[in-house]
């Protein structure tokens, strides 16, 4: 990891905003999963507010990024938009970025619950190591502004059909009130189980969505 510098983003990094947004969109399309779209101006604002972490290679190239969002008047915090440049993936950089943004979140909002929605097993594993646990959607913020952000996700129809109680993403939460509670739910032996559950979840939801659409057309 000596090839990377992971730091809180600032004024000097504003010019990377376009690259970051483009890579977020390309990555989501490649995975076939949804992501709430963000504009370069939104990314720049996060940098200026000190609510973002950026990773640079020692050669100066952009390598990764993640930012903080707050909801319900600061009671909930989300570490969103985690992205690593394709050439630096599988290097362990995502873990370093998640660790840095998690610590930044804890420093800025020590009493807030930190949550995330993800379809990625790698992110779930990192979250678990940081102290997150899988939860139901009802334990997340109910701030309408947060859920409105899901409208740009390709899976939004699934979320809507489930009345915002479930979707393809897995919800995970870190509760500072329980930070001393021992937890290591994502052991190596459970990864294959999680993979099967995620595939089953995706198959069931997509099948139900196709049926619903067919019935709507018929009516």
Image: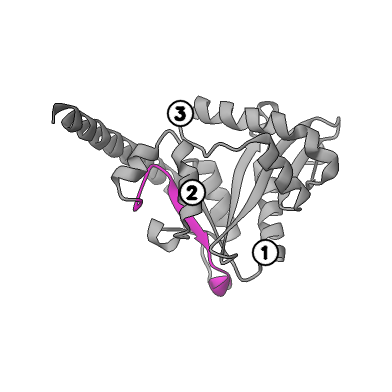
How far apart, in angstroms, are the residues tagged by discs 3 and 1?
32 Å
Q: Where is 75 relative to 152, above or below?
A: below
Residue 1 colored in magenta in the image: no
Closer to the chain start, of discs 1 and 2, is 1
Q: Which residue has dot 2 on it?
A: 117
Q: Which mark is residue 106?
A: 1
Indicate the quadrant containing the N terminus: top left, top right, bottom left or bottom right.
top right
Quick one: label 2 or label 3, which is nearer the N terminus?
3
Q: Which residue is mark 3?
A: 32
The residue located at (54%, 42%) in the rendering is 122
Percent position of residue 56, x then y: 79, 37
Q: Which residues are magenta?
A: 164-179
Does residue 90 appear to the left or right of 132 in the view shown? right
Q: Earlier in the sequence, mark 3 or mark 1?
A: 3
Image location of residue 156, percent across then percent down: 39, 39
The quarter of the rendered structure image containing the C terminus is top left
Q: Secondary structure at mark 1?
A: helix
As rendered, which of 211 and 180 lies closer to the eye? 211
- Mark 2 Cα within 10 Å, few/some/many (few <14, many 20+)? many
């Amino acid at each position: 990891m000596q090839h990377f510098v992971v730091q809180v983003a600032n004024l000097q990094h504003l010019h990377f905003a376009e690259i970051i947004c483009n890579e977020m969109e390309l990555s989501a399309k490649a995975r076939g999963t949804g992501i709430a779209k963000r504009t370069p101006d939104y990314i720049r604002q996060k940098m200026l507010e000190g609510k973002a972490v950026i990773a640079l290679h020692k050669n100066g190239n952009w390598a990764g990024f993640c930012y903080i969002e707050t909801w319900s008047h600061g009671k909930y915090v989300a570490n969103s938009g985690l992205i690593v440049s394709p050439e630096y993936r599988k290097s362990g950089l995502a873990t370093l970025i998640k660790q840095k943004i998690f610590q930044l979140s804890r420093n800025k909002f020590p009493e807030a619950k930190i949550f995330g929605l993800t379809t990625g097993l790698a992110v779930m594993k990192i979250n678990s190591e940081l102290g997150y646990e899988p939860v139901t959607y009802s334990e997340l913020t109910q701030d309408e502004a947060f859920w409105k952000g899901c409208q740009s996700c390709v899976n939004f129809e699934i979320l809507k059909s489930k009345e915002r109680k479930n979707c393809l993403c897995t919800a995970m939460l870190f509760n500072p009130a329980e930070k001393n509670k021992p937890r290591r739910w994502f052991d190596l032996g459970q990864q294959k189980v999680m993979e099967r559950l995620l595939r089953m979840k995706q198959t069931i939801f997509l099948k139900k969505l196709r049926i619903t659409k067919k019935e709507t057309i018929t009516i």
